[in-house]
Image: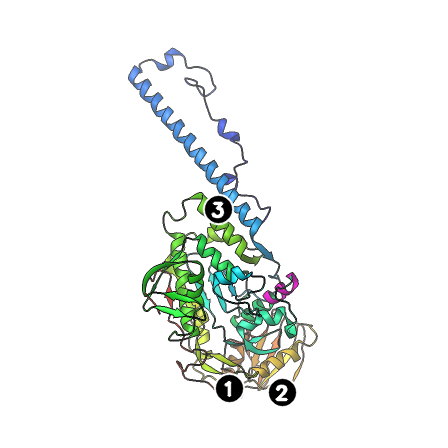
Amino acid sequence: MGPGVPLPPSLDPRRGAGSGRAGSRRAGGGPSGRRTTRSGTAGRAPGRRASTGRVRLVGRVAAGLLSAAVLIAGGWLWTIVRVFDATVHRVEVISADSGPDIDGSDLNILLVGNDSRGGLTAGELADVGTQADAGFNTDTILLVHVPANGTRATAVSFSRDLSVYIPVLGREGKINSAYANGACPNNACASVLTPAQQRAGTKSLIDTVSRFSGLRIDHYVEVGLYGFYSITKALGGIEVCLLHPAVDRYSAIDLPAGRQTISGKQALAFVRQRHGLPNGAYSRIQRQQYFLASVFRKLTSAGVLVDPLKQLALVRAVGSSLTMDAGLDPLELARQLQHLTAGNLQFLTVPVTGTGQNAAGQAVDLTDSAALPAFWDKVLGRSAPAASASPAVPRTQVSVTVRNGTGRVGLATQTATELQQLGFTVPSTGNSEHRTGTVIEYGAGQEPAARTVAAVIPGAQLRAGGGGGVTLILGSDFAGLRTGAGSPPAGPTAPAGGGGTGSITPPPRTAAQTDCID
């Protein structure tokens, strides 16, 4: 709940009893407050009157206790909300003109773990088991999709080395560098970011994920290393189960095999370790999903955190550890998710084909572009479209003309450059009459090629006609290309499981699973 937003009247402790007293009556009084005449009670036995009196007394006591409970609960909730609002760090990073909202009233929340050590003392660095290091990479990135009815949710993990188009760079790069490239152009940052740099980094990451997924980001939540450490301590630890002992000097993990409760330094090490694991960074993704599932189960279990002092400690730890957008109302989000069960909280990972090099010469993970359309359909809970009878056409075999119908100067040229970076051929660009919707026109026999273009243009409409080739006409709803779709970028690839940065995507899992993992 944002600052200054009142609680619902039923929970507001400042609301007086008010009209609740209007219905009270004096003992023995009638509806108008006058005493009932003796004739009005004729025929009633003394025992009946005594019994009725006891029932009324019990009812009044129960009503009083219930009223007190509501006031106490409301007052405590009011305190909790105020403490959270006073401690959480808010940033203005969600803009109203961030492109078409293809999933309507559903929510898309970007959840980010920032590995920055900036501002940590020597003692805090020792607490989290790491050393001072420059950089602002976001090695943990999850996109949480919540349908409007709140009955299920899907958390999508991104490999930190996933090759994606980064708008502020104007080229492909590792997704974990999008924040740093936005915050620190040419590495021009001190060890601690200014508020303006923080906003620029956050917006860069939001734009990158939105461009890749084709989804509008509605909210943003970020936690740093020490914040994660503090939250797990305030939670009293989280249960995990390891198939094998875990010891690694890079992450500082030192845990035995079996089921155990971890917090603080070892909890942070559990979600950070990638050396010595079967699938490297993808085993770490599995650890992160597993840990978040365990946190969800703890927070939603009966009787958890019934101690008000522990509640307050947790709220202070969470509030002081998080950065979130100014419009996110945690209380409203909790209401929306009140019927979410562990079995309906699903974790997925963006599919990859293997590893290779991007245009910048970086070793990266390459998306399994052929699998992405069905992947995003699963995330959004929609049925996959019927398979086209036309065969797929690789991007390198598609020629597309670009026309600008938005009135935005240079948009056709910019889009043409981005299409070329994705492998398309663009013979020409130009302007067209103003239009609202983006359209892909195609001539006879060109539908397969048009569908390849449509795979990277969220919301574009296919339309037969318009000559013999494929023409992309940009409308005012155009929000950029979706780089995480269509054919894979050029470059060498390794087979799945081929080492490097790791290329085995973890299988889907839900928060109800309590098995042991690597």
**Label 3 – label 2 distance at C-alpha:** 62 Å
Residue 73 percent coordinates (x, y): 46, 40
Magenta part of the chain: 195-202
- Local crowd at mark 2 within 10 Å, few (<14), some, or many (≥20)? few
Residue 125 percent coordinates (x, y): 52, 63
Which numbered circle lies on residue 491? 1
* Residue type for callout 2: Pro
**Label 1 – label 3 distance at C-alpha:** 52 Å
Is 217 placed left or right of 390 in the picture?
right
Asked if residue 472 is positioned above or below residue 28 in the image, the reply reads below
- Residue underneath mark 3: 312
Residue 199, magenta (yes or no): yes
Can residue 117 be seen in the rendering of this structure? yes
Residue 119, magenta (yes or no): no
Q: Secondary structure at mark 1?
A: loop
* Residue type for callout 1: Gly
- Residue underneath mark 2: 427
Residue 56 in which image quadrant: top left
* Residue type for callout 3: Leu
